[in-house]
């Protein structure tokens, strides 16, 4: 059976190829009756519409933007903050008539998503600036918006005021009388990652102003057991009365480790998280944490990239943070 094409439908209806094409992609160019007749004929003949690849080639646009991740998509959805961010990005792109394509790290040289997948632009989300993915986006000269990244002054950046957020968490513990304070941060491989870097700087500077040198422990995001192991070692090897954590997941690990060691929170130990994710209120005690508006960050990032694709200027934004005091912090325990 011969393949049904756009020309087949045009011949059957007695109109031009352009008229059939408009019925699918520019319906405002046709009367309602003519469009309905064309679509009905196309359905009867088994024609589903113009080939997306051909349409993209003709327009010079794919209608999709990439989201460059530093790990598998499954890891992103395991983390509440990343999942919320991706959902916000997808929602904003949909509102602007764009689709989302996930660009995961390459498994080998044969297929590099950032090099080989057709997209009009990309969001770079918590990736190593020196990674092959970031490099290929630059070589392709695609419009790029960096999220929680520092890719240079020429790249539009959407981020969070982590420095102020960390300062607020540290000052909260100092105001409660704590002077023996621990920090549970990411490992050195994330030293240049803006959130990890700025939170560490904010904690250290604020504590230093009070003459406090924190006990710093480091761990990885995955596996989840790593944070619990690091938290247990921190509590067993030091006499800290409070711990500042890179995120809420780390804070929950500290609380679990404390319980296993017979220490109550906040009676014996105060714990401060970061992000105000669902994890913050999912257990007992509810976490004192630093809130960032992840949904707003996703909307701003997607909107900025859409503006660039539309030939409009896009501004960088730094979102504010807010200390949310709940039940996991209290006065320094008395001897």
Image: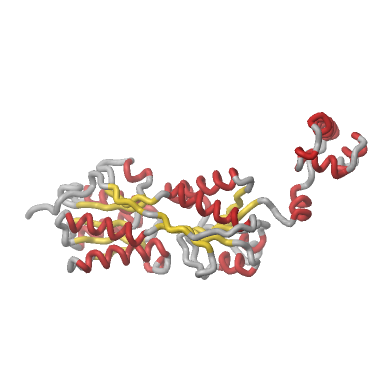
Judging from the image, the colouring scheme is secondary structure
Where does residue 53 sit, x and y in percent of width and height? 75, 51
Q: Is residue 190 visible?
A: yes
- Residue 190 position, x and y percent, is 41, 66
- Quadrant containing the C terminus is bottom left
Q: Report the residue at 60% width, 50% height from top.
A: 100
Residue 144 image-quadrant placement: bottom right
Q: Nearer the viewer, residue 259 or 150?
A: 150
Give the quarter of the figure containing the N terminus. Answer: top right
Q: Residue at x 65, y 66 (%)?
A: 140
Q: Residue at x 61, y 46 (%)?
A: 96
* Residue closest to the eye, 224 or 17: 17
User: Which residue shows up at 50% across the image and 52% down it?
Assistant: 300
Residue 148 sits in quarter: bottom left
For residue 50, side relative to residue 172 (left or right): right
Closer to the camera, 285 or 236? 285
**Is residue 1 at least partly visible in the picture?**
no
- Taking the image as shown, residue 146 lies to the left or right of residue 221, namely right
The residue positioned farthest toward the front in the image shown: 313
Q: Taking 175 as reference, is 121 left or right?
A: right
Tell me the quarter of the picture where residue 46 sits: top right
**Residue at the extreme left of the image, as rendered:** 335
The total of numbered circles placed on residues is 0
Residue 69 location, x and y as percent?
A: 52, 57
Q: Position of residue 158 (x, y in %)?
A: 48, 58
> Where is 2 relative to 134, above or below?
above
Instruction: Name the one closer to the observer, 81 or 88.
Output: 88
């Amino acid at each position: 059976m011969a393949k049904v094409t756009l020309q087949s439908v045009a011949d059957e209806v007695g109109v031009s190829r352009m008229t059939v094409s408009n019925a699918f992609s520019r319906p405002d160019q046709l009367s309602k009756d003519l469009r309905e007749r064309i679509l009905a004929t196309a359905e009867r003949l088994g024609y589903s519409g113009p080939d997306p690849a051909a349409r993209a080639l003709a327009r010079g646009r794919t209608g999709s933007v990439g989201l460059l991740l530093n790990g598998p998509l499954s890891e992103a959805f395991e983390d509440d903050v990343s999942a919320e961010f991706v959902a916000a990005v997808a929602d904003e792109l949909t509102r602007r008539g764009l689709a989302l394509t996930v660009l995961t790290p390459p498994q080998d040289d044969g297929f590099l998503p950032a090099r080989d997948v057709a997209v009009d632009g990309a969001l770079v989300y918590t990736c190593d600036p020196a990674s092959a993915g970031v490099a290929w986006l630059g070589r392709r000269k695609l419009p790029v918006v960096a999220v929680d990244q520092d890719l240079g002054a020429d790249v539009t950046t959407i981020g969070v005021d982590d420095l102020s957020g960390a300062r607020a968490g540290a000052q909260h513990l100092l105001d409660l009388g704590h002077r023996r304070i621990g920090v549970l941060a990411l490992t050195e491989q994330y030293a240049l990652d803006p959130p990890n870097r700025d939170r560490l700087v904010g904690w250290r500077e604020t504590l230093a102003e009070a003459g406090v040198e924190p006990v710093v422990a480091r761990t990885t995001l995955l596996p989840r057991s790593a944070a619990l192991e690091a938290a247990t070692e921190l509590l067993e090897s030091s006499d800290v009365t409070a711990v500042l954590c890179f995120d809420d997941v780390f804070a929950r690990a500290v609380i679990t480790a404390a319980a296993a060691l017979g220490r109550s929170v906040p009676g014996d130990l105060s714990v401060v998280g970061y992000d105000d994710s669902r994890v913050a209120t999912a257990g007992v005690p509810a976490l004192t944490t630093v809130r960032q508006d992840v949904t707003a960050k996703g909307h701003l990032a997607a909107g900025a990239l859409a503006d660039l694709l539309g030939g409009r200027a896009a501004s960088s934004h730094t979102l504010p943070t807010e200390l949310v005091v709940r039940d996991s912090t209290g006065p320094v325990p008395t001897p």
